[in-house]
Image (tube, helix red, strand yellow):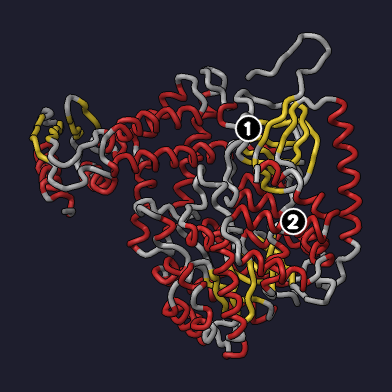
Amino acid sequence: MALEHSGTETSPRERVIRGIPASTGIVEGTLLDIRPESAPAEIGVRDPDEEKERFLSAVDRLLEKIRHSQRYLTPELRGFLVFEEGVLRDRNFRSRVLRLIEAGYSAERAVSMTIEEFARPMEQAEFPVFQDRARELRALARVLAQEVRSGLPQHLTPEKGEILVSDHLSVQEAIEIVRNDFKGVILTRGGKTSHPVLLLRDFRVPLLIQTEDFPEENTTGTPAILDARRGIVVLWPSPQTREQYRRILEAWEHREAELLALREEETSTRDGLVVHLLANVELPEEIPLLKRLGIRGVGLLRTEMLFHTHQGVEEQEAFYRAIAEDMAPHPVTVRLFDLGGDKVLDLSQEANPFLGLRGVRVLLRAPHLLEAQLRAILRVHRHTRNLRIMIPMVTSLEEVLAVREILHRVAREEGLTEEGLPQLGMMIETPAAALMPDVFARHVSFFSIGTNDLTQYVLAIDRTHPILQTEFHHLHPAVLRLLWFSVRRAHKAGVWIGICGEMASDLEALPLLVALRVEELSMSPSVYLDAKGIIHALHGEATRNLLEQVLQASTLQEVRGLVRAFYREHLPEIAELILVNKEDLDGV
Amino acid sequence: MKSARMVERKVVIPNRLGIHARPAQLLAQEAGKYKARVVIEKDGVEVEARSILGLMMLVAAQGTVITVRAEGEDAQEAVDAIVRLVESGFGEE
């Protein structure tokens, strides 16, 4: 639908668009729309010489990235990247793109038109192997178009608009958004657990994803209010709407000031049950925010970003050191490269990437990669003494033992004694691991539950599945029963256990996590203050009763109903602030 | 300079998956070793043998007949080598 322009002084009519809130907050500003559609579709708009340069340098950058990723892989894994490289080096491909650019098309358009030309006959073939390749080609076209766009840094400054609109983002773009202080971001597509989304959320950038009816035409310059708490964006807000939002913001800021006053206090329930709240982190730039909020430790340091750009031991060392020194004496939990699945590696030959080479399975097949990472961690830990190591995607004891053995060997080479080693822990994110904490407990110092993957594997729902998003939920009773089982087994074996998945950032789930008596919750810094406030207001005993009820529940709906009722009964003021809207929109 | 020679041979794709990514890669690589310009034709569509994208666009599945055509001084060697590669099933079943 086109916005109405009346031609007089009156603004177009207010329009409300819904999406999924991926980070909280409310901001007002004008939009800056960088969706690829905004690259001119018509010809003759951009200078062909500049466009050629943008295209060729994007190809070079992408080839460089691929070359980088290949260095530490086994020949077997390397094969998966060869296809992409072959396409980028294909002269036929390049010359067609260049010809279209000469005809006046933008580089992005020329890339997507050319790829389409090749992909279409492959898609129409009745052979799955060709249809798969067609999909991969399109993915490659997207990546390349993104790379072309990232060569246009002027796109990502908030001068022309403070709220950025895109279809999806690269991690690099997300970083640029944070650095340039955009007020908020709207991603018309975007996955809830994709890296750029997690990153923006960690930096507390108000963020709305998967908006359904966002105008197709370019919206740069449109005044808007982005309400990431309720999951809406209001285009051309009326004076009344503006006034209403001004009042909401005031109340919100008041509450935040109250919570900040608690920053030096330990987090505990009214009856004295202590819960350690840590943060999930991806970049050194996030640490100042953690300190400002009073967060004592990193429960999950994601390292996949390093994989593309900083694989050398010294480069990794610098990265870990920056974070470890800044956080000391509080702990920093480094998760070893968690590649595969939907992250970083395009293991496109796999029929089921989530059931294939992932996490520790990749690491043990790429020992150079694992050793370099462990070496960098050990060299930093030797001085800072606050690192912990966490193994991702464990299913079998042999995997833990194999990583331990390599860790010990690298430690010997580095001249470190047994006592000088960081704690070694593992993620519980497969049902296999969740069922056997007692077995693993003899060989690890801690557990951390990754609820995104655990939910995916328990419910047999691909967590990136676009249609099954509402059925994919960590409050499903089956997930809760398994959590309950795991936590008890871990405690019985005398090993502490934490949660670092999405669930730890879900305020709705918080009373249940308190009831489970997990020692540590590692969450997005954006929800830290709220979580702290809620735990301070909770009664540990009351949460136990809730847990007992919930463990008897039959459906996700029933669980959420019980939690909602609990909030309304015990924390009515907070329920108002956090449960409203988001859940109303879910229609539960 | 010798005059350009044109050589062509037909060959049946024997492997189960046809000319998908890896075989396309191998074929393009092989074609790149010769001075001759090599093209592959299937059902009237002709593509550069050095272009993996072009090769895959043909959707040459198992049992398809393709024509390998080359022009240039080492055209015969190029065509023979590529036909050998195809007949070997690209080392696949």
Q: Residue at x 71, y 62 (%)?
A: A510
Q: Is there CB contact under 8 Å for labels 1 and 2?
A: no
* Mark 1 residue type: Ile
Q: Nearer the viewer, residue A546 or A148?
A: A546
Q: Where does label 2 land, which residue? A: A565
Task: Residue A256 in the image: state x and y as whole percent.
Answer: 87, 54
Q: Above or below — where is A193 with respect to B31?
A: below
Residue position marked by numbered label 1 in the rendering: A34
Task: Name the chain letter of the residue that bears numbered label 2.
Answer: A
Q: Position of residue A183 (x, y in %)?
A: 77, 41
Q: Chain of mark 1?
A: A
Between residue A272 and residue A385, name the one nearer to us: A272
**x, y percentage for residue A322?**
69, 67
User: Alpha-carbon neighbours of circle 2 within 10 Å: few (<14), some, or many (≥20)?
Assistant: some
The answer to whether A22 appears left or right of B53 in the picture is right
Image label count? 2
Other-residue count near label 1 (Cα within 10 Å), few / some / many at <14 / 14–19 / ≥20: many
Q: Secondary structure at mark 1?
A: loop
Distance between the Cα atoms at labels 1 and 2?
42 Å
Q: Nearer the viewer, residue A277 or A295?
A: A277
User: In the picture shown, does residue A221 fall above or below A363?
Assistant: above
Which residue corresponds to the image point at 55% horizontal and 52% vertical from the top-left? A472
- To the question of a shared chain for discs 1 and 2, the answer is yes
Q: Nearer the viewer, mark 1 or mark 2?
A: 2
SS for tag 2?
helix
Q: Is residue A322 visible?
A: no
